[in-house]
Image (cartoon, grey):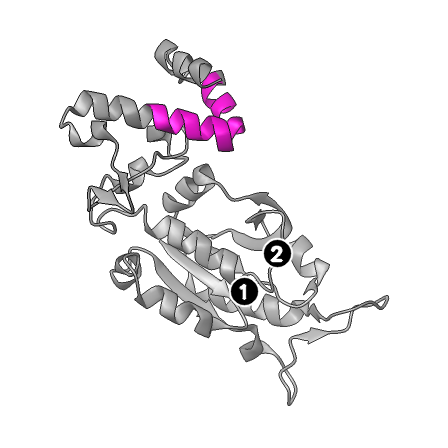
Amino acid sequence: MRFDVITLFPELFTPFLSVGITRRAFESGQVDVQCTNPRDFATGNYRRVDDRPFGGGPGMVMMAQPLELSLAHIRSQRTDAAPVVLFSPIGKRLDHAAVQRWSNSSGAILVCGRYEGIDQRFIDTQVDEQISLGDFVLSGGEVPAIALLDAVARLQPGVLSDSDSHHMDSFNPSLDGLLDCPHYTRPEEWAGVGVPDVLLSGHHGQIERWRRDQRLKLTAQHRPDLLEIARAAGLLSRQDEAVLQAQG
């Protein structure tokens, strides 16, 4: 798959693409990432990509023309009709289902806004989908783009050392969309606190039940909305419900 990123700061992506375990996806070409800078398509001595907003107000607005020329350049290099995605506050919040959808796609063109925003005419005519990371504002779309690329990369075959690792992640359908359980490693006792006995028992059935119980309790405590989704889908057993009822 290929993701093209329209960004004024392509240098922000360089370290991300070359470090960490997800670099395997980018180095192998499983997830091909190409950055295009709108400034390369701006005109004038200063190659301006922004200007003051009509109607007054603070900040600057990214101009439509450099963005459109960047998009045309990318389209000339791609053979598919990749959707154009903008990261913005009005977008649908990114979740595991969306990441899974993107990980099974041929990619997209990601637009990273800056300043006060982007000329609405570009959004209306060129953008197919908008995505948000949450109810807060960032300085630009680069961080959300990196978050999406990282989430997509780790779902690709062979990227993680353990191929089953991502199936045990929070929100994964393998866990019925619940939060993951606590994890422990050596030493068996640290700062006067030991590892739960069941994890040292070697009894796999009891260990899996303990982990399921912990996932249920953590989800009920921190994300009850996820629990209700799992319940509505019929994913909770009678034993699950008994655990939740005992917790209160």
Q: Position of residue 104 (x, y in %)?
A: 36, 43
The picture quadrant where one finds residue 212 is top left
What are the residue bounds of the magenta stretch? 213-231
192 is within the stretch colored magenta: no
Q: Amino acid at mark 2?
A: Gln
Q: Main secondary structure of the magenta part?
A: helix
> Element at badge 1?
helix
- 185 or 169: nearer the eye? 185
View extreme (top): residue: 238
- Residue behind mark 2: 126
Mark 2 neighbour density, 10 Å: few (under 14) some (14–19) many (20 or more): some
- Which badge, 1 or 2, is on the more N-terminal residue? 1
Q: Is residue 248 above or below residue 117?
A: above
Give x and y (percent) for residue 66: 61, 72
Mark 1 Cα-neighbour bin, 10 Å: few <14, some 14–19, many ≥20:
many
Q: Is residue 224 magenta?
A: yes
Quadrant position of residue 179 = top left
The reply to whether the C-beta atoms of the residues labelled 1 and 2 are less than 8 Å apart is: yes
Question: What's the residue at 44%, 37% (across, down)?
Answer: 97
Badge 1 amino acid: Leu
The CA distance from mark 1 to mark 2 is 9 Å
Mark number, residue 176 = none
What residue is pinned by disc 1? 71
x, y percentage for residue 201?
15, 27
